[in-house]
């Protein structure tokens, strides 16, 4: 499979050829599903670096994980909001790294009880994983931050877990709209102590930012 473009969208942090190559090699390795965690007693040992992916339902999280790992169906792509209701662990590179696909959030057809259970599971997970290096919050590049995104960001601030915003579907945004979304996002991030000030722009369809995202993860 041919590699994706290394063209960086405006505002993307720069990466050296060595960093990009490190990312390419990491994601050339095998990536396999390990287990789905519905309760904290099921968590695997924290014996390796861990990064997690979070985002509103249908933000393109599964598509992005599949593109990063060069797999067609590693993470299930679903048109049913809220399909992922557990922490799904994937082993990358035979023990080098855990990729964790967190439950989608922000969908309307969920009871308050279910939302409270989600919050409890996620917050306890975030607080208890010393090997969790970063949470990537995926935000639709056409719409920017939503209230549910801000809710998760506040949880991460309280848990003192570093996180970075990854804008998805950036190929579908008009330039003027994207400028406004990025300006608003930069201002919002200043209010959150655990957030990285930089964010990445990506597109699973066009390959925008994918190599840079791999390099970022490899650096962790």
Image: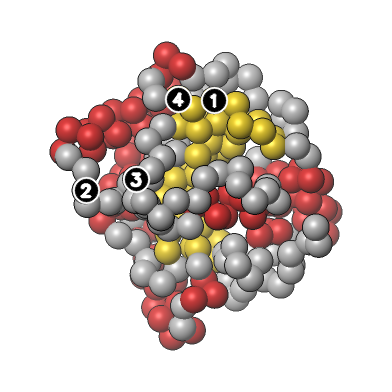
Gap in angstroms between the C-alphas marked 2 and 3: 9 Å
Q: Residue furthest left?
A: 112
Instruction: Say which residue appears at 65% left-offset and 51% top-offset.
Output: 72
Badge 4, how many Cα within 10 Å: few under 14, some, many 20+? some
Indicate the quadrant containing the C terminus: top left, top right, bottom left or bottom right: top right
Instruction: Say which residue appears at 21% left-offset and 48% top-offset.
Output: 109
Instruction: Say which residue appears at 52% left-offset and 45% top-offset.
Output: 76
Check the image and tell me how it is coloured. Answer: secondary structure
SS class of the residue under badge 3? Answer: loop
Gap in angstroms between the C-alphas marked 4 and 1: 6 Å
Which one is earlier in the sequence, the residue at label 3 or at label 4? 4
Q: Residue furthest top?
A: 41
Residue that mark 2 sits on:
109
Q: Are marks 4 and 1 in contact (CB under 8 Å)?
A: yes
Q: Height in image: 78 above or below 123?
A: below
Q: Position of residue 78 (x, y in %)?
A: 45, 51
SS class of the residue under badge 1? Answer: strand
Q: Residue furthest bottom?
A: 176
Gap in angstroms between the C-alphas marked 3 and 4: 16 Å
Which one is earlier in the sequence, the residue at label 4 or at label 2? 4
Q: Are marks 2 and 3 in contact (CB under 8 Å)?
A: yes
Gap in angstroms between the C-alphas marked 2 and 1: 26 Å
Instruction: Say which residue appears at 74% left-offset and 64% top-offset.
Output: 4
């Amino acid at each position: 499979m041919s590699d994706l473009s290394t063209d960086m969208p405006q505002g993307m942090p720069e990466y050296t050829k060595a960093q990009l190559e490190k990312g390419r090699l990491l994601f050339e390795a095998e990536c396999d599903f390990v287990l789905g965690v519905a309760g904290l007693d099921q968590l695997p040992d924290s014996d390796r670096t861990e990064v997690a992916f979070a985002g509103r339902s249908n933000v393109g999280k599964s598509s992005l994980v599949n593109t990063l790992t060069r797999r067609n169906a590693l993470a299930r792509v679903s048109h049913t909001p809220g399909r992922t209701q557990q922490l799904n662990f994937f082993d990358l590179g035979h023990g080098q790294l855990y990729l964790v696909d967190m439950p989608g959030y922000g969908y309307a057809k969920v009871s308050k009880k279910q939302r409270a259970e989600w919050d409890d599971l996620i917050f306890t997970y975030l607080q208890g994983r010393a090997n969790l290096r970063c949470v990537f919050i995926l935000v639709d590049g056409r719409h920017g931050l939503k209230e549910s995104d801000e809710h998760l960001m506040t949880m991460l601030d309280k848990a003192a877990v570093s996180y970075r915003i990854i804008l998805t579907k950036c190929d579908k945004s008009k330039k003027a709209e994207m400028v406004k979304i990025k300006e608003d996002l930069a201002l919002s991030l200043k209010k959150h102590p655990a957030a990285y000030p930089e964010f990445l722009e990506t597109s699973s369809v066009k390959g925008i930012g994918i190599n840079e995202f791999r390099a970022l993860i490899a650096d962790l």
